Image (spheres, rainbow, N blue to C red):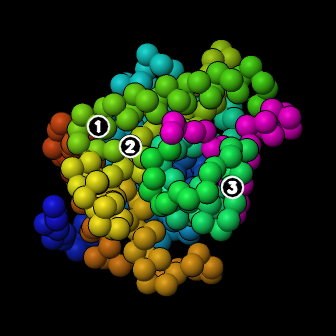
Amino acid sequence: MSETLPSFSADTLTAFAGIPAEMLNEVGKLVSFRRGKVRDVIDLGDRLVLVATDRLSAFDWVLGLVPHRGQILNQLSAWWFEKLSDIVASHILQVPDANVAVVKKCDPLLVEVVVRGRLTGSTSTAIWTRYKSGERNIYGIDFPDGMKKNDLLPRPIVTPTTKATEGHDKPISEDRIVATGLVEADLWHEVRNISLALFERGQKIAGTAGLVLVDTKYEFGIDVNGQLTLIDEVHTPDSSRYWRRSTLQQRLQAGLEPENLDKELVRLAYAAQGYTGQGPPEPLSPELATEASVAYRRVFEVLTGEQLQPASYPANPRVDAVLKELVC
């Protein structure tokens, strides 16, 4: 089923690039500020203020702006944190604005936990990319010959990566995580079991909404009380792969890609244009930005059962007001 792409105004297509310099001049002397690829972060000591922007990152580059991306990821993560709270505590404290979250400050674990249910992906750390190149032992897991892209795995698998502050995340096996001391053995066992439980819950809820949660990334930290805590974002179209369930088998039988309702549609569009991940990519086109925005909104609405109420643009006045209240 094809989507009818809405038209966006010029203001909307400029979207929310992040906290502007003039705002930083007002609050910068009072706080510690960091601009990440897709989030602006203000350190308030025991808390962090996460400002979710509309910047979209892929291939380790910021490609451009996707309208309402920040709002969708911020609000959807908060929704998921509540749905998963009986499995593991999260860092979320409050969501005072569509693009702003206040969270507990935690010491992050130095690994990202990726749980996968299918042999797929297009990045250098994806299991399909490595399988296609001839590898059969990937992340310490043996894979048989004869598998095809998008095949269902016998069971979900955990494929961790190290967290790179610059450049690419690096694949690492579970045994290596423990052997090198990145995570102590008992804690890693807990992280692993919780990650699989989160993925199972996510797949069930997504399935009820007509989606397939194919794979996802989790990040964890330790809070001030020593409690393992789910941090960053969870089950968003940025950190997860979602396929439309109703058309999946028909498309796979026809040799087509599934209907991607996540950031993968951007990656695949760049690959179709010949981009191989080497060197800076072309900026995100307005048409592809709009397509991604529609996909992200679709995921938000079918999961939550609620229509997205787009926050006002330009976003800077409302974000500015909230930050001043939080910081001053």
Q: Residue 229's spot in the image, x, y percent? A: 57, 25
Q: On the image, numbered disc 2 is attached to which residue?
A: 213
Which numbered circle lies on residue 292? none
Q: On the image, numbered disc 3 is attached to which residue?
A: 136
Disc 2 vs disc 1: Cβ atoms closer than 8 Å? Answer: yes
In magenta stretch: residue 162: yes
Image: 268 above or below 101: below
Q: Give the mark nearer the N terminus: 3 vs 2.
A: 3
Residue drawn at 37 percent across, 24 percent down: 82
Q: Amino acid at mark 3?
A: Arg
Q: On the image, numbered disc 1 is attached to which residue?
A: 207
Image quadrant where residue 289 sits:
bottom left
Relative horizontal placement of residue 97, taking residue 43 as reference (left or right): left
For the residues marked 3 and 1, what is the alpha-carbon distance in whole angstroms?
A: 30 Å
Image quadrant where residue 111 sits:
top right
Task: Single out the mark in the foreground, 3 or 1.
Answer: 3
Q: Amino acid at mark 2?
A: Leu
> Which residue in the rendered view is the most extreme toward the front?
146
For label 2, the SS is: strand
